[in-house]
Image (spheres, coloured by chain):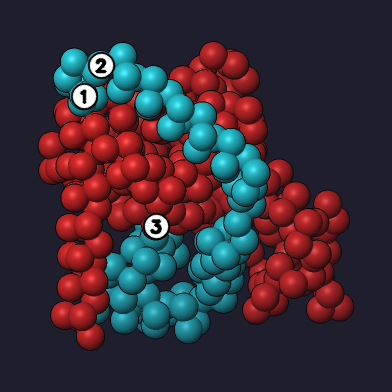
Chain colours: A red, B cyan
Amino acid sequence: MGTIQSNVTDDAATQEMALVQAAKGGDIAAFEQLIKRYDRNVFRIAQHITQNREDAEDVVQEAFLKSYTNLNSFQGNSKFYTWLVRIAVNEALMKLRRRKTDKTVSMDEDVETEEGSMPREFADWSPNPEQQYGQGELGDILQKTIQGLPASFRTVFVLRDVEGLSTEETAETLGLSVPAVKSRLLRARLQLRERLNRYFKKNKNGDHGGEV
Amino acid sequence: MGTTAVKCKEFLSELNDFLDGSLEPKMYAELQEHLQWCSNCYVVCDTTRKTIQIYKENEIYELPDDLRARLQNAILEKCRTMKAGKAGTGTPDTES
């Protein structure tokens, strides 16, 4: 199994490098394939960071255009995707800074890294707490909840837990140390959990409390 | 307090690696043991795992097809313009 999986991954990586090489040579159809592979991911990341639809659209365009313009500087030492994500994250953070609606825009800022005290919790959630809500209502809850996190926390969370980058890839993409990524990720996860608790925790009757 | 060496604060500091399955087997077993008697850590761990799962499984920022097509066209149009502007070389810029 491991070998088959590894071969599939190698094939995908080889195919992707071929597309990148073709695009470097001016093959726009090859670059189009790269756009189609990753535009949904870039949009998702941009929307998570900027929390603004128009900004996210701009980030998608600017990230792909910058990557196209700078393709020859991509050496292939990292995956094309992580290189692209780094460009997209920087664009998204710039959008945030321009709007100045978020005070914690820099990834380098001195975010408190102390782990904090153990949350005290007595009520568990049901096995599938999200089933208590309709899809639209659940989407509103999840959006509202993640909007409340500092940008540096939600950026780490979206790259690690939504997009599935490794801790090392996330660190490389954001220019952070591995311990800094781990610390931000823990705080992001715990803060989201704390905020979702009001919607998903069981009350004394075994029902769920919290309303949107 | 239980008999295990693991305390709640230690559990919290290892929670990420515990959830991500990236712990040494010995530490993983110690944390599992801690969860058996510490209901507070059990709930925090379980609800944090569900938090991650919910965000992973429920895509809240889907790119709609019509917008996707519009963005792709706009990007490709600009790429073509850039390429035409650099017809002498036929390749993207080399600046970084």
Residue A102 lies left or right of residue A137; in this view the side is left
Residue A64 lies left or right of residue A119; in this view the side is left
Q: Secondary structure at mark 1?
A: loop
Q: Are marks 1 and 2 in contact (CB under 8 Å)?
A: yes
| Above or below, comparing residue A94 to residue A144 in the picture | above
Give the CA separation, mark 1 to mark 3: 36 Å
Residue A208 lies left or right of residue B4; in this view the side is right
Q: Where is residue A180, by image quadrant?
A: top left
- The residue sitting at 84% across, 74% down in the picture is A207
Q: Is any part of residue B24 visible from this angle? A: no
Q: Count the marks.
A: 3
A92 or B87: nearer the viewer: B87
Residue carrying label 3:
A164
* Numbered mark located on residue B90 in the image: 1
| Above or below, comparing residue A150 to residue A33 in the picture | above
Give the CA separation, mark 3 to mark 2: 37 Å
Q: Chain of mark 3?
A: A
- Give the residue type that dot 1 points to: Gly
- Give the residue type that dot 3 points to: Gly
Report whether mark 1 lies on the same chain as mark 2.
yes
Residue carrying label 2:
B86
